[in-house]
Amino acid sequence: MNITRLIAALFGVVLFLPAVSSAFEDDESCLMCHKYPKMGRVTEEGVQKSYYVMPEVFSRTVHRNVPCRDCHSYIKELPHKPVKEGVTCNSECHSIENPSTGKPFSHAPIYNTYKESVHGREKVAKGPDADKPYCITCHTNPLYNKAEKAPPKEIVERCVVCHEDEAFATKWYNHTSRRIREVKRSSQEIVELCSSCHADEEFIERRLRLAAKEGRELGRKFPYAAVAYQNSFHGKVTKYGYTNAANCLNCHASPKNYYLSVHELRPSRDPKAPTNKQNRVNTCRQCHKTADENYAAIDPHPTHHKEDNKFNYYAEIIYGIVGDIALFGLVGMAMFETFGRMRDGVNWVLRNGTSWRRARSRRRKKKLQ
Amino acid sequence: MKLSRDASAVLETSMRQNKISAEVCQELEELVAMMPDDKKLIYQNVDSNPVGDLHRYSVHIRIQHLITFTTFLLLAFTGLPIHYNEAFWAIPLNSMLGGLEVTRVIHRTLALIFVVAMVYHGLTLLFGTLRQVSAGKFDIRRTIIPLMKDVRDFSADMAYFAGKKANRPDMDKFMYKQKIHYFAAAFGNTVMVVSGSSFLFPEFWNSILPAEYASHWQEMMRLSHPHEALLALLVIAFWHWYNVHLAPGRFPMQWTYLTGKLTREHQIEEHFIEYLRNLVELPAERQYMRENLLKRGLAVSEPVRNRVFEEYRKTILMDAPKEAAMAEEPGK
């Protein structure tokens, strides 16, 4: 009976597979070509590019409801001309309306904020800007995950009283609840993300050389920041999954509107930066409520590099030397003591009455006579 | 036995503080005279109960030691995985103890108990000293306070270990090694408490420090806390545990930290001056030592004279009329 069921189930899966692929409605006929896995080319720089689109994957991403040409707006005919710039994230979606304004939906406001930040760059960037992150460096087009498998029955039941369509209510609930619950990356993910560039030695080296060439001043901590953070108290407890310690963005992004300000990171020399001298006390006060000027003077992730922090550099060396002398001096003394006492016949015995051999050492006796 | 100058001085003080009679003084003089000059012969030929023979630590000191070492070890186990988070053992050890959310609570709670033990110790020292002073039995040489004698003892002991001297120096209740250890621990504990409190209350510490030192203070504390912890752990594992557990004569364990008593052979070897005090204070110990020397044929037949006893007898002869007069006074 069970085997029959299993075979029936397998047969069902095989039958159902094409149905999954066709869940993606290809109204624009893009898949005519892009369904082929070998669709791609090698660029003039020798980089292999794949233009293969997996409909069953795309149909589950967060952009699944956006038609291809809303973003790939330069495609006017088929087969299309070679693409120059590709998709930029500040274009308007023609088919999706922003319900709050009634205008076409667009990422332009956040994009413009990002453009003004220290990270801002064009989509196609050459030279120094190529090191900076574009939107998709941090934001991929991730699979859409519902917050819950089934929304709470009592909530959906209430929605459908007016909104009638249960599928709409479920979709709306999932969309909203997901954003209310999980909108931030975890502290560990943020540290990992920032460190992917700021702890990369080649990247740091490249930026330092460039700044020297251009006669531009980089922040004092620029070469060490990420590694120094990982060695700081905040960094260590964050590594262990503690969520109340500051991560990179808690101090480097303005606390006013987190979601906006993480896109407009500024160097500490910028008066608007929360790490600027004028703003530091308030930045610290987000967690350390009674912080004052003195408190804000603390380097939250100090280094022990000679060129950056002489005090820490020499203090660490002195601590090492003192520690070694104390430890080896004391252990050496204990060894010397054992050696001296053994000559007079002290023994490693389970003490029962005495630890000493009765026969006294003749060697010392002779020497002293 | 010809007593050393240090031993004579302490013996004289001890006899005076204990107000011993001329008869006991006589008994002591004979006993000391019977002892062989080679101290090794004495401590190698006494009966020692591994659990301890002679009093050394009060119950308060033992409790403080127990609290300090249990909290210290657990503090180290909950703290070190955070500093050495890249070591292979760090994450497993931390998870084994319940993860960071648990260990940070354990660490802070134990830190408080650790501080309480330090305060308890301070009070024990204060009241113990006051009691000794009021009983007229205080002697600075019997305390842990370092004196010039410790420097002399150190060099004499090193000379003995090198084979250049026949005997170890006459040392008091606390020898140079114990004084080093005590002050290293006292200093280390203070560093741990101050640096730990500067992590827990950084706002407070920086509000009382000038701004230009604020950052360096925190940096030094961040450096001190793990360095001092690791140093203390290594010193305890490789030096202290060697001295009290593994060293020959102490193996497998000195019971002092539990019983508060030291073995007789150990006291005569390393704390001979304290042993002389015990002879003054404990009639039973005098009797044991006399019988032991006679039984083992170690008693010296041609005794040497120690002036300390004669001088003590002179002082009691001089004091006797005064005391008699004072005793009569209320009757007038």
Image (tube, coloured by chain):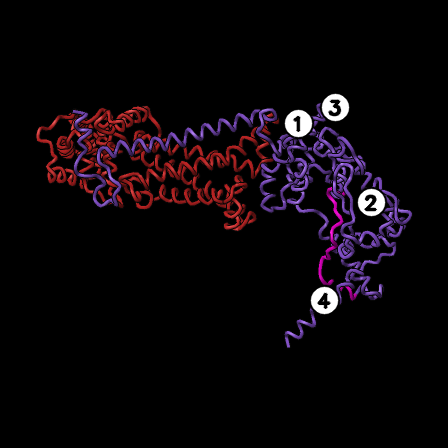
Q: Which residue is mark 3?
A: A214
Report the amino acid beneath label 2: His
Task: Determine which of the numbered discs, if any, sits on residue A333 in the image.
Answer: none
Nearer to me, B244 or A5 = A5
**Viewer-proximal residue, B69 or B55?**
B69
Tell me the CA gap for discs 2 and 1.
34 Å
- Mark number for residue A13? 4
Q: Chain of mark 2?
A: A
Q: CA distance from mark 1 to mark 3?
A: 17 Å
Above or below, A273 against A369 in this view is below
Q: Earlier in the sequence, mark 1 or mark 3?
A: 3
Whichever of callouts 2 and 4 sits on the residue coming sooner in the sequence is 4
Crowding near the residue tagged with mark 4, few <14, some 14–19, many ≥20 C-alpha atoms within 10 Å: few
Rendering quarter of residue A107: top right
- How far across and down, in percent of the image, does residue A353 sit? 21, 44
**Magenta segment includes A141:** yes
Q: Position of residue B167 (x, y in %)?
A: 22, 29
Disc 4 and disc 3 in contact, CB within 8 angstroms = no
Chain bearing tag 4 is: A
Task: Rate crowding at label 2 as few (under 14), some (14 to 19) or many (20 or more) other CA atoms within 10 Å.
Answer: few
- x and y percentages locating residue A2 in the rendered image: 63, 75
- Give the mark, 4 or 3, whose residue is nearer the N terminus: 4
Question: Which of the image's four quarters has the C terminus of chain A?
Answer: top left
> Where is mark 1, residue-wise?
A220
The chain shown in red is which? B
- Chain to which mark 1 belongs: A
Label 2 sits on residue? A107
For the magenta stretch, what is the residue range? A135-157
